[in-house]
Amino acid sequence: MPSPQRSRFVEWFVLLRDEWLPSQRERITAWYEVVREEPFLIWHTPAIRYGVYALGCLLAVWLLVWAASLLEPAPAKDAGPRARTANFHVVCSDPECGHHFMIAREFGFKKFPVKCPKCGEKTGQRGVRCNSPACRGRFVTTTTIDGELRCNQCGAVLGPAP
C-alpha cells in the first residue's frame, strides 16, 4: 500500500518545527547579546519599533474616545432608560378590511405579515405614509417596482426600496 502524501500544511509545519524554530533561538540569543551591549539598537529592530507604533496608535484612539465621551452631554435627570422597542404602523392588506393599527416590537422587526386585530387574519403589512393627493397622508401597504417603493392604492413613488 503506498504511503499517503502529506498536505502542504503538514510539510510547512514540519519545516517550521525542525528547521526554522531552532535557528530563531540562536538569532534571538545573538540579538539579545547585541542589545545588552548597545541598548539603543533595540529601536532599530522593526518588530519592536512597529509594536511601539501600534501601541501608540491604540493609546491615541483610546484617548480620543475618552475625550469624546467627556464632550457628550449628560442625559436629562428625568429621562428614562433607552428605548428597546419601536412602534410600527401596520395596515391590513386585505382589501375588505384595510385596518390601520400600531404594534410595539423590538428595533429592526421584520417578521411581517402580522395578525390583524380586526379581521383576525395574518395580513398586516408594514405601513408607509403616502403623501400623494389621492392618499393625502394615509398609511398604505407598498410594492417594490424597479427598485422603488410604490403605493398600492395610487401607485405613487414613495422612495427607493430598502
Image: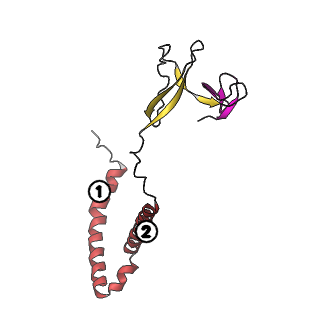
Residue 61: in magenta span: no
**Mark 2 nearby-residue class (10 Å; few <14, some 14–19, many ≥20):** few
Residue 150: in magenta span: yes
Rendered-image quadrant of the N terminus: top left
Which image quadrant is residue 16 in?
Answer: bottom left
Residue 21 coordinates in the image, percent (x, y): 28, 65
Farthest-out residue, right: 133
Q: Nearer the viewer, mark 1 or mark 2?
A: 2
Q: Which residue is mark 1?
A: 14
Tell me the amino acid under the disc marked 1: Val
Q: Residue at x 53, y 29 (%)?
A: 89
Farthest-out residue, bottom: 37
Describe residue 36's horizontal placement relative to residue 63 as left or right.
left
Residue 101 coordinates in the image, percent (x, y): 52, 24
Q: Residue at x 31, y 65 (%)?
A: 20
Q: CA distance from mark 1 to mark 2?
A: 41 Å
**Mark 1 nearby-residue class (10 Å; few <14, some 14–19, many ≥20):** few
- Helix or strand or loop: what does disc 2 sit on? helix
Which image quadrant is residue 35 in?
Answer: bottom left
Look at the picture and state if 43 lies above or below 112. below
Describe residue 100's horizontal placement relative to residue 133 as left or right.
left
Q: Which residue is mark 2?
A: 60
Q: Exactly how many numbered labels are in the figure?
A: 2
Tell me the amino acid under the disc marked 2: Ala
Residue 81 coordinates in the image, percent (x, y): 38, 45
| Pointers 1 and 2 in contact (C-beta within 8 Å) | no
Residue 64 coordinates in the image, percent (x, y): 45, 65
The span shown in magenta is 137-162
Which image quadrant is residue 69 in?
Answer: bottom left
- Helix or strand or loop: what does disc 1 sit on? helix
Look at the picture and state if 69 lies above or below 27. above
